[in-house]
Every structure is written in C-alpha cells, then in structure tokens.
Amino acid sequence: MSKEIEDHRNFNRSGNEPFSSVLGKHVSRRDMMRGGLGLAAVSVMGFGAASAMAGSDARTGIKGASAPGKKPLTLAFESIRGAKLDGVVVPEGYTAQVLIPWGARLTSDVPEWREDLEMTPEIQANALGMHHDGMYHFPLNKGSESREFLLAINHEYIDQSALWAPQGGPTNADEGQRPADEVRTEINAHGVAVVHVKKQADGRWTHVVDSPYNRRITNASAMELGGPVAGSDYARTKFSPEGLLARGTSNNCGNGYTPWGTYLACEENWPGYFVRNADRQLDDERLGIASGRGRYGWETAAGDAVEQSDEFARFDTTPHAADATGDYRNEARTYGYQVEVDPYDGSRRAVKRTAMGRFRHEGCWLGKLVPGEPVVFYSGHDSRNEYIYKYVSRATWSPADANRPGANIDRLAIGAKYLDEGTLYVARFDADGRGEWLPLTPAARTRDGRLLHEALSLAADDTAGILIHTCDAADLMGATPMDRPEWGAVDPTSGDVYMTLTNNSQRTAEGSEPTYTNGGSDVTETGVGFATAPVNAPNPRAENGAGQVIRWRDGDDVARFDWEVFVFGAAASDADNFSGLTELNQFASPDGLWYDDRGNGDGILWIQTDNGYAGVADDTNDQVLAVVPNGLETGDGAAVVNAGNQQQLKRFAVGPNGSEVTGIFATPDKTALFINIQHPGNWPASEDATHTTEGSVRPRASTVVIQREDGGQIAV
Ligand code: FEO
Ligand code: CA
Ligand code: CA
Ligand code: CA
C-alpha cells in the first residue's frame, strides 16, 4: 500500500528481549560486511540440519526433492533493465494485457467505465473495486483450467482523488461530515471481487459481464464469524447480539486459498478505519485503533437521514449504551481475521475464521499438504517489529475434501472442519538457525513461566480472549520481532516456506536497548510491545530500508523449525549489499511472493516489490523478479543468494510510475502470468499494459496478464 496511506506504527510494545545480544556473541556486523561468514554461515548450517531431518541434502540446505539426475530449471529470459515509465515493461517476446481494472463492470445494468464516470454506491457494488492486491484462480471445469476460471481478487484500499476525480475530489476528506453516498461508495470500493474470466480465440483475455458467478463482497456485506470468537462476549454488537455475524471486510491485502477450493481474503490495515474515544481497551492500544477521526472519516456520516442499520455509526466503537448489544464497542473485534469465501457460491456469506488469530494479516499461505496430517497455514503481521504465525488444524487432511470443479460441495463446512479448531503458534527465531513455534493456548507457559491465560487476566477456558489479544499473547510468549512480514510462499514438495520482510525503519543497532511505547519495559506487562528493536539474526540490518526474504522448514516436531536468510534486498552500490546484487537485479522492499511449482520438485520463486528505498527507486519502479531456488548452490555468503550466484535472480517485469506490483499466479499450464498493478500514478492508457501514457489519465489499479508471443510457458 502506498506510503501516503500505510500505517506501520510500532504497535508491538512487548518487552521481549530480542536475541541480538545472543547473536552478538556469534557474529558482529563487521563479520558480515567482510564477507558474511557470520550469521549466514551459522544459519545455513542450521538449515542444513533441518534438511537432514527432512531427508534432504544436508550439505547445502537445498531441497533434495528434485527428481534424481534432473537438472534444475533455468530461466530462459534476460534480466531487464530498470524503468521509470507510465507503462509495464516485460522481456522481449512477451505481451502484457490490462484486464479488469477498477470500475470494469460485472453486470450490464450499471454503466461501462469511462474517464468521466461519476462513481455511485450502486455502480461500485457491481464493478471491480479499487487497488487490486492478492488474487487466486478457481477452475470451473476439468480440462479448461488454464482458459476459463473464476478470479477472486482483493481490493485493498482506495485512492480518493481518482475515485472522486470528476467531482474534483472527496467532500470533507479531512474535517466535517462526509456525505452518505460518498461513504457508501468508498465502502463498496473495498473488499473482494469474484470475476469470471476466460481466454478468447485470439489469445487475449476477457471477463464475462453478467456471469452468474460474478460477485462483489464489500466492506458492508454481512458475514459470519467462525471459530472460538464466534458467539463469545467479545463479538456481541447491536447488529448481532449473539456475536455470530459481522459486517464487511476491508484492507484485504495478500491472499490465501485452501485445498478445498475456497479463497482467503486477509484483513491487514483495518484498525485505522475505526475510532474509539473513551473506555479504550488493551487490544485497541496494541493494534493501533485511534481516537478522533477514522482514515476516511466514515463514522462522521452517522446520523445522516439516509443511514440504515447504523452503517456509518459502527465505525465509532466508543461505548454509549448499557451493554455491548446496544452499541458497536465490539465492532473492531469483528475485524483482523482471515476471511473465507466460497468463490463458486454467491449465496453463501463469507466466514471470518477467528481461530487463525487477530492482527494485521498480510496474507495466508498453505503449508505442505500431507494426507492424514494437520493442515497448516502461515501468516505474517505486517507492522514494524511484529511477528510470524502458524496455524495447525486439529482435523487431519483427507484428500476426499479436495476441491472438485463442478461438484456440489459444501466448501464452507469443510472450511469449518479445518479452520475453526486448531492451534495458533507464533515464531521465535534463534541465532543458531533454529526456531521454535510457541503455542498461543490458555495453558501455554509464558517466557517468564506463567500460564498464558493468567498473564492476560483471562479465564482458563477463554481461548476467544487469547485470540482477541493475539499480539499480547505473542509478546508474552517471547516471539521474535521481525522487519514487517509481508507475503509467504511454500514449495509444496519440500515444504520450505519463504517470507518477505519488507523493511523496518525502527530496527536499531546491535547492542542497543529495545524501546517500548505505552511506558512498558517488562514482559510482565501487557499492552506493550516493541517501539524499536535491535538487530537480530533474521533481521540483521539496522534501519533496514531494503528488506530481505527468509525461508524456513518445519521439523517433524510441530514446534521446531530451521531457517536461513534467502536473499537481501539492496542497491547495487550499498555497503551492505549482502546478496551481491547488480543494476540488473537490485531491488528493495520485497512484498509479494509466489512459489511457482513446475513439477518434479522444481519451481520458480517470484518476488514482487513495494519500494520506497531511494537507492533502488532512483533507478527503477517496482518490479517482479524470478529465481529458481533449486539452482542455487549455497556457499558461505551472507545469504542463499550471494555474489557468486546472484545472476540467477532475474528481473522479469517493471511496473508503471507510482505503482507497486502485488498479487501473482500463473495458469496451471504456465502460459499466462497474472499480476496486479496497485496505485499507479498515470496508467493505464490502453488495453496494452506496455503502452506508455501520453498526457494524463484517471489512474486505475488493474490485473495484468503476461503471455509469451509464441504461446509458450512463462520464464522457461
Ligand atoms: Fe498491504 Fe503489507 O501490504
Ligand atoms: Ca506501496
Ligand atoms: Ca503487501
Ligand atoms: Ca508493502
């Protein structure tokens, strides 16, 4: 999300001692600068141990899953140069098509997009939302999976100046009462779209207007709560006195999908949309719910003569009634979840799966799927010095539950089976390349030896309370503060998990004392977290502007994992360019990530950026890079990608000025790569995404389909 809007204040105020002091005994920053025999060697060895555990190549830590004797994939394109254009740049021999930009209509009873279209609540509820982010494809029929499918797509937030361009901008954006219809339109520009798309005979893609599958889920749509918070006192509102229903989903950022054919929309920067002016609670402080005015001032439309069912009033969570069933004091507690959508059945409400934790979920990534074993999902909390989580289902995976296109399946009932009962863990990364998943259960022991529920002043059976206070629970357990976890990606064969750590301006030098907001200084306090945290092993650079990608592999013991740094972002000229990047692959602030499985245990890791780091941004707009992890011999460099092998990390595409590139998948036949362009400044000017805008256009986020002119597979 854009710099202007993103809010990554330091919500973590825990007193966990980061292990920089431990790390300091093993490796100094100077060691790393000298050639990286410090942290890197330590962590690579740790990962090698994990590989040995998993029956793979212990020497390198590289997956041993490739078919014996088979050479790793090679990328058959040349890394492209950086670009700063109002157009998308792709390698020679490729095309890029604009598909379903913001405002493209889903039904023919609302007008087609035009440059001077005045957006209304009704049009926006029947058209693509703004600021496309995570997305995934869902096949309709066996055999046509790569030519026709349902595309589920997140609309993360809005660009008010583009939305209200014909009217000269939003009304009362910063003070005064917002008009009801503007607020409704903005609410409808958020959420999720399900769009029926298909490839035409000429090779170009289109969406099917009026398809019965087309659907918008907005930040006003009624949805259900599932899992421990559902029906608890924490979720009771005037709208749902039983605490079983919620309204709307917002700030859906990275996404997830399940093996049973549902989509997961993940709620990230939602706290800024709510205000609470009195009787503030622990979780309001910890998650950053403000007092005063919400991000777009939606609550100011409360009391408008046309308001229905407190549609605006609910964004002010200040208590004013006798109890929670008379106001919206708990409204924000119905946000911060993974939201499951059945893309095939528009009659079914989405379900917020509360067992997977409540925080700023960037996304949700399915772990290696094994019949008879629990289903695992990984997730990161994208704020400075926040944590990485893992959810492990109680039910074990039954292949009979796998998605079957066209079959009459109750996918949300299957979702309840796996996602409503399970254990949430948070990650502690140790300096020796190992790590531990710490359970967030009432009877877990905190780092100072107390029962977790007692440390949070909760009853022994109050799992819902632990989940509402996920971040406080994680503080108390001793989780490792990270450099803003964004997307994950999982190699489905080896189970290796990759995750981007995008940047962290509040990472301080080795040996510095952590600082806390809210006056906290000790883990015995709740409602406190890291304001700043000194460098630690997986986050080894102070004032980290360029970010890094880590990877880990879970052990046979559900609580153990081994990890290493995969690649460090940097400008080629940086002193701490630990991965030896050059002008052909320098990048910063990795964000989107996707493991593109190409069979035989091999695949491509795609990395997308959301960069504001001058050293790189001066040279290029945000970009898409590719690398084949199996092709990398890990040496004694500072990361898996190092000066000796960095040329295998190649720049594949560059986005338009002002945009970030986010959201990614390829069709199963690998002939079309779908990406999203979010918050472009002056694009697109035509259906050809590579066309450079002359003059100015009303900017629109859009999906872009990249294909090869010869129809072959992408990248290889
Ligand atoms: Fe919405 Fe963390 O990116
Ligand atoms: Ca951005
Ligand atoms: Ca992101
Ligand atoms: Ca980002």
Image (tube, rainbow, N blue to C red):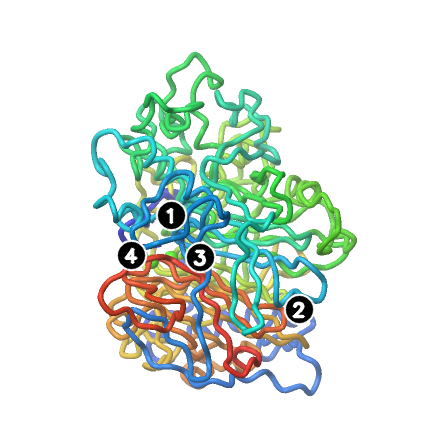
Q: Nearer the viewer, mark 2 or mark 1?
A: 1
Q: Nearer the viewer, mark 3 or mark 1?
A: 1
Residue with the mark numbered 1: 157
Of the pair 648 and 240, the residue shown nearer to us: 240
Report, in whole angstroms, how far the alpha carbon at label 4 lies from the one at label 1: 17 Å
Q: Judge whether residue 37 can be spotted in this image.
A: no
Q: Quadrant of residue 91?
A: bottom left
Residue with the mark numbered 4: 698
Amino acid found under the numbered disc labelled 2: Thr
Amino acid found under the numbered disc labelled 4: Arg
Q: Nearer the viewer, mark 4 or mark 2?
A: 4
Please state the horizontal and vertical placement of residue 237, each as a whole percent of the image.
49, 23
Please state the horizontal and vertical placement of residue 225, each as a whole percent of the image.
58, 34
Q: Is residue 398 left or right of residue 706?
A: right
Secondary structure beneath dot 2 equals: loop
- Residue at 62 percent of width and 39 percent of height: 348
Secondary structure beneath dot 1 equals: loop
Residue with the mark numbered 2: 493
- Mark 3 within 8 Å of ligand 3, using the beta carbon: yes
Name the image quarter holding the C terminus. bottom right
Of the pair 456 and 552, the residue shown nearer to us: 552
Q: Earlier in the sequence, mark 4 or mark 2?
A: 2
Report, in whole angstroms, how far the alpha carbon at label 4 lies from the one at label 2: 44 Å
